[in-house]
Amino acid sequence: MTESYVCIDLETTGLNPKRDKIIEIGAVIVEDSRIVEKWETFVNPNRRLEDHITALTGICDEQLSEAPAIEEVLPRLLAMTEDKVLLGHRVLFDYSFIKKAAVDRKLSFERSGIDTLKIARKYLADLESRSLSCLCSHYNIVHNAHRALGDAEATAKLYQRLTEEFCEKEAVEGRRSLFVPKALSYHVKRDTPITVSQKEQLYKLRDRHKLIIDYDIDRLSRGEASRQIDLLLAEYGR
């Protein structure tokens, strides 16, 4: 059993780490099976939230408008997870978003992790669902769903219950045991910053059509800038 780890959970603008952005981070550091530190922060994604994300999480644009950018919070997140096992419910999802953010800033993020979802799928297959909410209901774990810190705390408690119930059964698997940390793998290319010509074109389109743009042009990546230019040209022309 792994008794020291950091449990991470993210809220994001969508499900694709190559396109979507982190909007909230929750982290719980556990040492010797005891929570020793908690951290949570909003993250400004430099875009408006879609209505279904606000409905799901309760997070709104006003809460994110003054939040720090990912560049400001990423160093602390990487430091908190350094030399620690990552724990998560579908941990590769959270890992992929953090790795994308790190790679885009020429930083390394290689970690090992344990996935409570994989454990639940193996041993609790008879349940109607293995979602975090359903598992917390099954174990009577208090859960503030779809908020990063609430999900992280609930996942840490869920891991303790799964360990108590199934760790000995998994012991026969040796290094294949789902309770043994495995190297996490997600391959992603770095997004390059917006080019000078893209900036000029976006500013010209904004000024020519007297548009109110709800994102910071200078913070866009090259790919994001290209998509925004295409959208503006399609709607307003040159």
Image (tube, grey):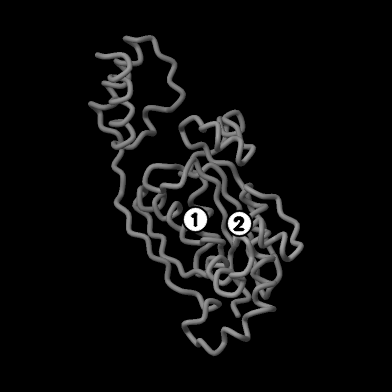
Q: Amino acid at mark 2?
A: Ala
Q: Nearer the viewer, residue 173 or 122?
A: 122
Quarter where residue 222 is shown: top left
Percent x, y for residue 228? 33, 27
Q: Which residue is mark 1?
A: 94
Name the secondary structure under disc 1.
helix
Residue under the image location 60 percent in, 62 percent down: 130
Percent x, y for residue 229? 29, 25
Percent x, y for residue 70? 48, 43
Residue under the image location 47 percent in, 56 percent down: 93
Q: Is residue 77 left or right of residue 190?
A: right
Residue contact between numbered discs 1 and 2, judged by CB atoms under 8 Å? no
Point out which mark residue 27 bears.
Answer: 2
Q: Residues within 10 Å of mark 1 (few under 14, many from 20)?
A: many
Q: Residue furthest bottom?
A: 172
Q: Residues within 10 Å of mark 2 (few under 14, many from 20)?
A: many
